[in-house]
Amino acid sequence: MFLTVHATVGAIIGDKVSNPFLSFLLAIIFHFIFDMIPHGDKALSCFAKTESQPGIISADKFRTFVKAAAFDGGLVLILILSGFGFQIFKNPLSVAFGIVGGILPDIAVSFYYMVSKNIFLKKFEQIHAFVHEGIIKSELPLKIGILMQTIIAVILISIVIMY
């Protein structure tokens, strides 16, 4: 899923759960639950999944990934600033922890591929990849995945605004 969806889920959890640490943990768990849903962003991946040479596949794929991540990150920033600016959230600290928990798994995996190949991050990446590809073995085309994730994000944002 895009960071926008994960951050919105984390914000909803944080708003409903007043304990920041519980919000953080639940957001991580829900990150993995949402990642089980086929979501069509595999085409945007610029990381090789081979055991011998994990890392960035090509400069072109990396540029496409960076553009998509920047757009997604910008949406997350707009949502966060809007939510806090309009004081939509009842538990702002818990919301912040939920957002971080919601996006942390993807940040950790990106960190593994781009910066550090430590054993903990390698195991974490393997679990993350299994959730993405090993439980439900189906992938959507990118356009359908973007549409589906947009619909999910709009529904989740509506929940935040309405409740």
Image (tube, rainbow, N blue to C red):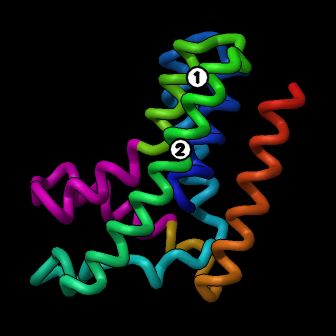
The answer to whether residue 142 is seen in the rendering is: yes
Q: Compare marks 2 and 1 and give the one earlier in the sequence.
A: 2
Q: Secondary structure at mark 2?
A: helix
Q: Single out the mark in the foreground, 2 or 1.
A: 2
Query: Residue shown at 43%/78% (left/top)?
Result: 44
Image quadrant holding the N terminus, namely bottom right
Q: Is residue 163 above or below residue 44?
A: above
Instruction: Residue 10: name its quadrant.
Output: top right
Query: Residue shown at 50%/69% (left/top)?
Result: 132
Q: Is residue 58 above or below residue 26?
A: below
Q: Is residue 136 magenta?
A: no
Residue 143, how many percent across, how many down? 65, 83
Task: Tell me the number on the disc at residue 138.
Answer: none
Query: Residue shown at 28%/76% (left/top)?
Result: 63
Task: Tell me the number on the disc at residue 76.
Answer: 2
Residue ID for mark 1: 95
Residue 25, how many percent across, how many down? 50, 30
Query: Residue shown at 16%/75% (left/top)?
Result: 55
- In this rendering, would 7 be left or right of 43? right
- Which residue is at the front of the view, 144 or 34? 144
Q: Which residues are magenta?
A: 104-131
- Which residue is at the front of the view, 129 or 43? 43
Q: Is residue 105 magenta?
A: yes
